[in-house]
Image (tube, helix red, strand yellow):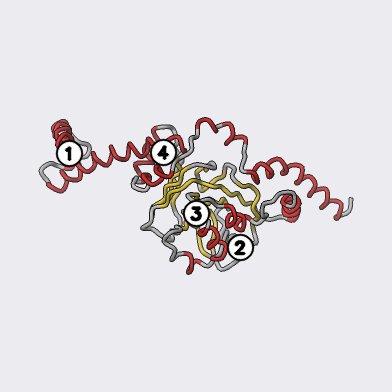
Amino acid sequence: MDNGSKVRSLAMAAILFLSPHYAAGQAGRHPVVESLTGERPAVSDSLLEKLKGVHIENAWSVLMSHGYKHQFVGGFVVSQPDVTLVGRAVTLRYLPVRPDLEKALRSIAQKTDHSPVFNVRAAEETKPGEVIVVEEGGMVKDATFMGDVTATGIRARGATGVIIDGGVRDYDVIRKWTDLPIYVRGVDATAQAAQIGVDWNVPIRLGDVTVLPGDVILGTAEGVVIIPPQLVEEVIKQNETTETREDFERLQMKQGKYRARDVYPMNQELEKLFEEWLKQRK
């Protein structure tokens, strides 16, 4: 078999293998996500607004109590460390480029009405309240998901933020946008050349965490925590309970009437005082 025949054979094999997966990704469907549909309620805008007041550690504690042990990702360059990022995840998966894969993806893209270039597609299809979450395996050089032009499009569509396990360019421009926090592994002047978008709205890996489409993102200067939508209300309620208790503990620490070991955790005497304090507040 000559080299041309080998390339055509590999491209056809890639098309046959990728077609159902890629088509599902293009339409925003995935068997895992579909099987969980009944367990993952839509999260309202009002709940997202309340989530902005949640401390990331409190959210983490609730998730841990439900067996979600790998939900926090840190180590990002954060463009707006003083802005809390909240939104519904739209997931994008990239893979390193190879000729047969690129050819197969171009062929499949021609059969859909979606742009084969994922940052362009994000600038066309993002909905208000969504966070674009991009898997690029931590690569930065030649793996910059977006520059300021496509980022402007994503911003204009109403995205609340972008999280990239890879790079970004034109950072001097986009880092000034307080309404679009950006979380990236690094900054580079190179364009996206080493990776290509393969899947849209499928389960992806972000650092050590799995992100499903529709998960809720809570991001601060520390990093991001990924919240399954069915746990958002509990996270909000538990945060209020935890913060109320810790307000009392902080008050006792400041007043200095008790030793730190008596306050954290509270001894029996302080537990009783806390109950009285709660009654007075109510």
Q: What residue type is labelled 4?
A: Val
Give me the residue at 48% from left, 65% from top: 174
Determine the image quadrant of residue 66: top left
Q: What residue type is labelled 3?
A: Ala
Q: Which amino acid does label 1 sit on?
A: Arg
C-alpha distance separating marks 3 and 2: 24 Å
In what element is the residue under mark 1?
A: helix
C-alpha distance separating marks 1 and 2: 56 Å
Q: Which of marks 3 and 4 is nearer the N terminus?
A: 3
Q: Name the residue under label 4.
A: 232
Q: Which amino acid does label 2 sit on?
A: Asp
Q: Which mark is residue 159?
A: 3
Q: Residue 142 carries which label?
A: 2
Query: Which of pointers 1 and 2 indicates the residue nearer the eye?
Result: 1
For residue 114, side relative to residue 90 (left or right): right
Q: Name the residue under label 1.
A: 281
The answer to whether the residues at label 1 and label 2 have Cβ atoms under 8 Å apart is: no
Q: Which of marks 3 and 2 is nearer the N terminus?
A: 2
- Residue 148 drawn above or below residue 253: below
Determine the image quadrant of residue 28: top right
Give me the residue at 71% from left, 40% from top: 20
C-alpha distance separating marks 2 and 4: 36 Å
